[in-house]
C-alpha cells in the first residue's frame, strides 16, 4: 500500500498567503494608495514641487476653530459613550436571562452600525421642531423642548453621536467585564471590602486599559464622522470633516490642497488613537488569560 504523499511545507505556506492576496489587494487599493495620495498632495503646491504651503495656509483661524470644535465634540461624546456604554454592558452581562443578553447584544450591534444620514433623519423626525416626540410632549404634557433644546445644535449632535457611540462601547467593554472573575469579588468581600471598595480598588484598575482603549476608539470614531453632522446641522457647526468637504466642493473657495493638509492631520490624530487603542487592548488582554 503506497504511502500518502504530503505537499511540501513551502507549498502550504504559499497557498495560505495566496488566499490572502485579495484581502491585501483590497487594503492597498482602498486604504494605502488613497493615504499616500492625500499625503503627497498635501506636500505639493499646485504641482510645483514639494512645499509646506498647504499646511501654512491651513493655520487660518476658521480651520483651527474646526479642529478645536471636532476635538471637543469627540472628547465629550467619547467620554459619555464610555460611561453610559459601560453601564449598559454591565447590565447586559449581569442579566441571568440568556435570551435577554443575546437580544440586547444584537440590538447594540445593530445600533452601532446605524449612522450617517439615516440616523440624522431619524432624529429630525423624532426630535425636530415638528418631530413626533416634540409634538407629543407639547400636545399631551405641555412640555416644549424648544428653544431650550434644538436637535440641530451641538447638543443635538452629541445626542445623535451617542446613539452609535454608546452601543459601540457596550460591545467593546463586554469581554473585559466577562473577564472579571467571581473569585476576585469574593476575595475582596471576604477581606472586608464593600461593593464600592471592590469596584474602586480591584475592578476599575483592571478595567482601566479597556476603558482607555474604548475612549480612544470612540474618539476616533467621532472625529471622522461626517454624514450625521452634515445632514443634521449642515454648515452651522464648523467641524473638520465639514470644512474639508466645503474646500473640496468649492462652496466658499476651491482649495483641495488645504483639504489634503487637513485630512493628513486628521489621519495623524486617528492613527494615534488607533495605536493607543491597540496598546490598551494588549494590556487589557493580559487579565483574560
Image (cartoon, rainbow, N blue to C red):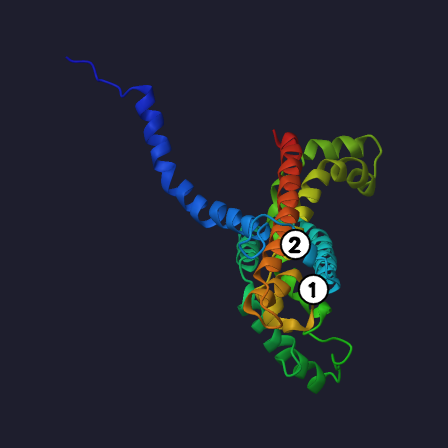
Would residue 51 appear left or right of 15 to someone viewing this image?
right
Seen as rendered, the residue at the extreme left is 1
For the point 73% across and 61% down, which residue is it?
A: 60
Residue carrying label 2: 53
Q: As rendered, which of 59 and 163 lies closer to the eye?
A: 59
Q: Is residue 57 above or below residue 120?
A: above
Distance between mark 2 and mark 1 Cα atoms: 34 Å
Q: Is residue 266 above or below residue 274?
A: below
Q: As rendered, which of 38 and 268 lies closer to the eye?
A: 38
Residue 80, image x, y percentages = 72, 56
Question: Which structural element holds mark 2?
Answer: helix
Seen as rendered, the residue at the extreme right is 192
For the point 71% across and 84% down, which residue is it?
A: 138
For the point 66% across and 33% down, which residue is it?
A: 283
Q: Given contact means CB atoms under 8 Å apart, are the residues at marks 2 and 1 in contact?
A: no
Q: Nearer the viewer, mark 2 or mark 1?
A: 2
Residue 188, image x, y percentages = 79, 33
Of the numbered discs 2 and 1, the one sitting upstream in the chain is 2
Quadrant of the image containing the C terminus? top right
Residue 169 visible to the viewer: no
Residue 275 visible to the viewer: yes
Residue 135, image x, y percentages = 66, 83
Quadrant in the rendering for residue 274: top right
Please rate how many residues cluster around mark 2, counting C-alpha atoms within 10 Å: few if below 14, some from 14 to 19, many from 20.
some
Residue 212, image x, y percentages = 71, 43
Question: Which structural element holds mark 1?
Answer: helix
Mark number displayed over residue 158: 1
Q: Is residue 147 above or below residue 174?
A: below
Please rate how many residues cluster around mark 1, counting C-alpha atoms within 10 Å: few if below 14, some from 14 to 19, many from 20.
many
For the point 62% across and 67% down, which residue is it?
A: 229
Q: As rendered, which of 95 and 35 lies closer to the eye?
A: 35
Seen as rendered, the residue at the extreme bottom is 139
Amino acid at each position: 500500500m503506497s504511502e500518502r504523499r504530503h505537499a511540501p511545507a513551502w507549498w502550504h505556506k504559499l497557498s495560505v498567503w495566496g488566499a490572502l492576496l485579495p484581502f491585501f489587494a483590497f487594503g492597498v487599493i482602498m486604504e494605502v494608495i488613497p493615504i499616500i495620495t492625500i499625503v503627497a498632495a498635501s506636500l505639493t503646491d499646485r504641482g510645483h514641487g514639494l512645499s509646506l504651503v498647504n499646511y501654512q495656509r491651513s493655520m487660518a483661524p476658521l480651520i483651527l476653530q474646526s479642529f478645536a470644535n471636532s476635538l471637543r465634540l469627540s472628547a465629550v461624546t467619547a467620554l459619555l459613550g464610555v460611561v453610559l456604554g459601560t453601564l449598559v454592558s454591565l447590565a447586559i452581562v449581569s442579566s441571568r436571562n440568556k435570551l435577554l443578553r443575546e437580544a440586547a447584544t444584537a440590538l447594540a450591534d445593530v445600533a452601532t452600525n446605524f449612522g450617517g444620514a439615516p440616523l440624522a433623519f431619524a432624529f429630525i423626525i423624532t426630535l425636530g421642531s415638528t418631530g413626533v416626540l416634540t409634538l407629543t410632549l407639547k400636545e399631551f404634557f405641555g412640555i416644549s423642548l424648544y428653544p431650550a433644546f434644538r436637535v440641530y445644535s451641538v447638543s443635538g449632535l452629541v445626542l445623535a453621536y451617542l446613539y452609535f457611540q454608546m452601543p459601540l462601547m457596550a460591545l467593546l467593554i463586554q469581554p473585559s467585564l466577562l473577564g472579571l472573575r467571581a473569585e476576585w469579588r469574593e476575595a475582596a468581600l471576604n477581606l472586608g471590602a464593600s461593593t464600592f471598595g471592590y469596584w474602586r480598588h480591584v475592578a476599575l484598575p483592571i478595567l482601566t486599559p479597556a476603558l482607555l482603549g474604548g475612549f480612544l476608539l470612540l474618539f476616533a470614531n467621532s472625529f471622522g464622522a461626517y454624514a450625521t453632522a452634515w445632514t443634521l446641522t449642515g454648515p452651522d457647526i464648523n467641524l473638520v470633516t465639514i470644512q474639508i468637504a466645503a474646500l473640496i466642493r468649492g462652496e466658499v473657495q476651491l482649495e483641495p490642497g488645504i483639504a489634503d493638509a487637513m485630512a493628513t492631520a486628521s489621519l495623524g490624530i486617528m492613527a494615534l488613537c488607533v495605536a493607543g487603542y491597540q496598546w490598551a487592548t494588549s494590556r487589557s488582554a493580559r487579565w483574560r488569560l
